[in-house]
Image (tube, rainbow, N blue to C red):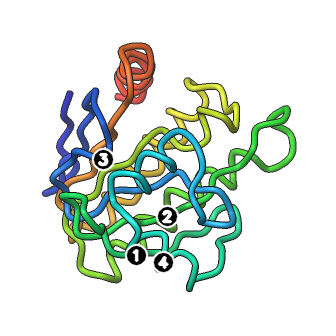
């Protein structure tokens, strides 16, 4: 599913974030940036030791912020590492932190002249964020950002599995 926002495209695909041909992919990282499970583990495994070495030099990243490294052996030239919130009850600033994670990643891409970026569904795995709530925040944040930042030509959400894809598709259709 695709949506044009000015001169930019917002796209939903089902697939593997590590196989994307965008200039940058986003890692749903932990605050230590030293690898983990899920998307984080897959990116570190596929990208190789160069990503780990750069993350180690960076030293960490607080929730809602983003850091950038090389893409190592990935197709993507860069990995933007962002830390989403651990979902507890939705009353502890989780929505604001999640939106900030997406905005920080997009702003870092803009600063670096990156024209295409692929996101996973941040915080919806081990961090437990309900997918439909997270999708609404992710999509609305990206749409709002693209309205004011035409330098990014493609924002792709790469959803792992049909349930995640269908949730994002439902939410996007509801936002239109």
* CA–CA distance in space, label 2 to label 3: 13 Å
Q: Earlier in the sequence, mark 3 or mark 1?
A: 3
The percent coordinates of residue 144 (x first, y second) are: 41, 54
Q: Earlier in the sequence, mark 4 or mark 2?
A: 4
**Would you say the residues marked 2 and 1 are in contact, meaning their CB atoms lie under 8 Å apart?**
yes
* CA–CA distance in space, label 2 to label 1: 8 Å
Mark 2: give few (<14), some (14-19) or many (20+) Cα within 10 Å: many
Image quadrant occupied by the C terminus:
top left
Q: Which label belongs to residue 81?
A: 2
* CA–CA distance in space, label 4 to label 2: 14 Å
Q: Earlier in the sequence, mark 2 or mark 1?
A: 1
Q: Would you identify the image quadrant in which residue 72 lies?
A: bottom left
Which residue lies at the image location 33% right of the left edge and 52% below the top edge? 46
The percent coordinates of residue 82 (x first, y second) are: 54, 61
* Along the line of sight, the residue nearer the viewer: 138 or 28: 28
Mark 1: give few (<14), some (14-19) or many (20+) Cα within 10 Å: some
* CA–CA distance in space, label 4 to label 3: 18 Å
Name the side, left or right, on which 27 lies relative to 87: left
* CA–CA distance in space, label 3 to label 1: 14 Å
The percent coordinates of residue 76 (x first, y second) are: 22, 61
Which residue lies at the image location 55% right of the left edge and 41% below the top edge? 137
Residue at the far front: name it: 49
> Does residue 3 sit above or below 68 in this rendering?
above
Q: Which label belongs to residue 69?
A: 1
Residue that badge 4 annotates: 53
Residue that badge 3 annotates: 18
* CA–CA distance in space, label 4 to label 1: 9 Å
């Amino acid at each position: 599913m695709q949506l044009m926002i000015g001169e930019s495209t917002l796209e939903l695909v089902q697939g593997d974030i590590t196989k994307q041909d965008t200039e940058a992919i986003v890692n749903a990282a932990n605050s230590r940036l030293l690898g983990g499970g899920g998307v984080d583990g897959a990116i570190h495994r596929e990208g190789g030791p160069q990503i780990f070495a750069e993350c180690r030099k960076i030293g960490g990243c607080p929730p809602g912020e983003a850091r950038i490294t090389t893409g190592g052996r990935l197709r993507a030239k860069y990995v933007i590492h962002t830390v989403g919130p651990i979902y507890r009850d939705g009353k502890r600033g989780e929505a604001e932190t999640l939106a900030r994670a997406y905005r920080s990643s997009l702003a870092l891409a803009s600063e670096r002249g990156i024209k295409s970026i692929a996101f996973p569904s941040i915080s919806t795995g081990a961090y437990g964020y309900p997918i439909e709530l997270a999708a609404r925040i992710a999509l609305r944040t990206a749409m709002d950002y693209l309205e004011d930042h035409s330098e990014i030509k493609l924002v792709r959400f790469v959803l792992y599995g049909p349930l995640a894809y269908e949730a994002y598709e439902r939410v996007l259709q509801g936002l239109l």
